[in-house]
């Protein structure tokens, strides 16, 4: 087991290096020069950098210590070890590699967009390998462990706004920087959620019908999608009905909707968004 875990840590290194490089570039090369208030532990570390010139990466490691001690029981030893590795790599890249590249001093809106996109992609690469960069990530994933219906991006956005307000008050002290900070956080969470969940986004249809066999056969024949029949009864009438459950991509759902109306005009159809679909015909874990 230990050998397998060590092998997994080694396999994670490309994602850690790529993700850490993108985060370091977003924070140091774009956010620091424009004095943006960004979120998370990196945002707090950036405040210390802008006020006192302290290294961002080293400060982030120092601030992470009490957070690690407070959350390791919730997140587990394996996740902690993965995250410490990712954290060390990201912090090292932040203080040694990113300063070797020029700071962007152009349009602030472009700087905000680049910061949000780069950091969003970087965090997604690390999260998708079952790791994190520590700090607010530990708090975010601890909340998600207790409330799994919340997305990582949404939790991060709420926490981020708090740190952004603090950074605005202590460093830039103007509303424009606050707005840019919110834009960065929204863009970061959107890009991250899109990469983590949007790749396998789709639709789910729930079809209440008396002709479940015909509908399943039609969906399979025309769209090569499987379906599941659930036995149910009406809450008011008590009459027996079948519910056909079918997951598909967004393009196929339009055709499936028309097919259902043609096969059983009396069918009751509910179409829902699916943020992630895992299994045969979709993404594999």
Image (cartoon, helix red, strand yellow):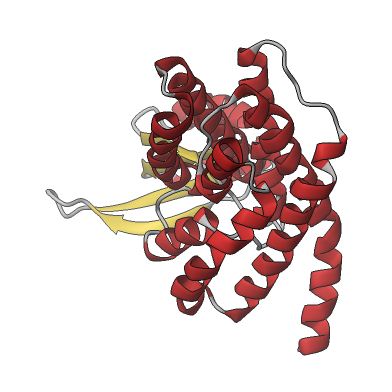
Q: Compared with residue 84, is residue 125 higher up or lower down, i.e. above or below?
A: above
Exactly how many numbered labels are in the figure? 0
Residue 133 x/y as whole percent: 64, 57
Q: Quadrant of the C terminus?
A: bottom right
Q: Quadrant of the N terminus?
A: bottom right
**242 and 178: which one is in front?**
178
Q: Is residue 245 left or right of residue 98?
A: left
Who's the residue at 78% across and 55% down the image? 92
**202 and 42: which one is in front?**
42
Who's the residue at 74% across and 31% down the image? 29
Residue 240 x/y as whole percent: 27, 55
| The image quarter in which residue 224 lies | top right
**224 and 56: which one is in front?**
56
Residue 195 shows up from this direction: yes
Residue 153 x/y as whole percent: 50, 43
Who's the residue at 69% across and 27% down the image? 30
**172 and 223: which one is in front?**
172
Residue 285 shows up from this direction: no
Residue 41 x/y as whole percent: 54, 50
Q: Compared with residue 103, is residue 199 higher up or lower down, i.e. above or below?
A: below
| The image quarter in which residue 278 lies | bottom right
Who's the residue at 66% across and 62% down the image? 131
Which residue of the protein is positioned furthest toward the top in this rendering? 107
């Amino acid at each position: 087991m230990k050998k397998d875990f060590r092998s997994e840590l080694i396999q994670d290194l490309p994602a850690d290096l790529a993700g850490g490089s993108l985060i370091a570039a977003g924070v140091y090369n774009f956010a620091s020069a424009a004095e943006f208030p960004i979120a998370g532990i990196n945002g707090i570390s950036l405040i210390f950098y802008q006020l006192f010139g302290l290294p961002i990466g080293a400060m982030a490691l120092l601030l992470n210590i009490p957070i690690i001690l407070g959350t390791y029981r919730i997140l587990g030893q394996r996740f902690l070890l993965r995250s410490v590795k990712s954290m060390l790599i990201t912090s090292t890249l932040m203080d040694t590699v990113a300063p070797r590249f020029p700071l962007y001093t152009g349009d602030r809106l472009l700087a905000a967009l680049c910061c949000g996109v780069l950091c969003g992609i970087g965090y997604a690469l690390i999260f998708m390998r079952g790791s994190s960069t520590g700090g607010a990530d530990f708090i975010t994933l601890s909340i998600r462990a207790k409330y799994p219906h919340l997305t990582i991006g949404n939790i991060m956005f709420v926490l981020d706004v708090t740190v952004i307000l603090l950074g605005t008050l202590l460093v830039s002290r103007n509303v424009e920087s606050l707005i840019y900070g919110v834009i960065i956080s929204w863009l970061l969470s959107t890009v991250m959620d899109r990469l983590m969940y949007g790749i396998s986004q789709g639709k789910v249809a729930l079809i209440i019908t008396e002709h479940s066999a015909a509908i399943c056969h039609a969906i399979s024949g025309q769209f090569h999608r499987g379906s599941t029949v659930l036995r149910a009864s009406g809450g008011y009438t008590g009459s027996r009905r079948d519910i056909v459950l079918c997951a598909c991509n967004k393009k196929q759902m339009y055709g499936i909707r028309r097919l259902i109306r043609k096969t059983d005009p009396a069918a009751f159809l509910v179409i829902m968004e699916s943020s992630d679909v895992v299994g045969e015909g979709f993404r594999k874990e």
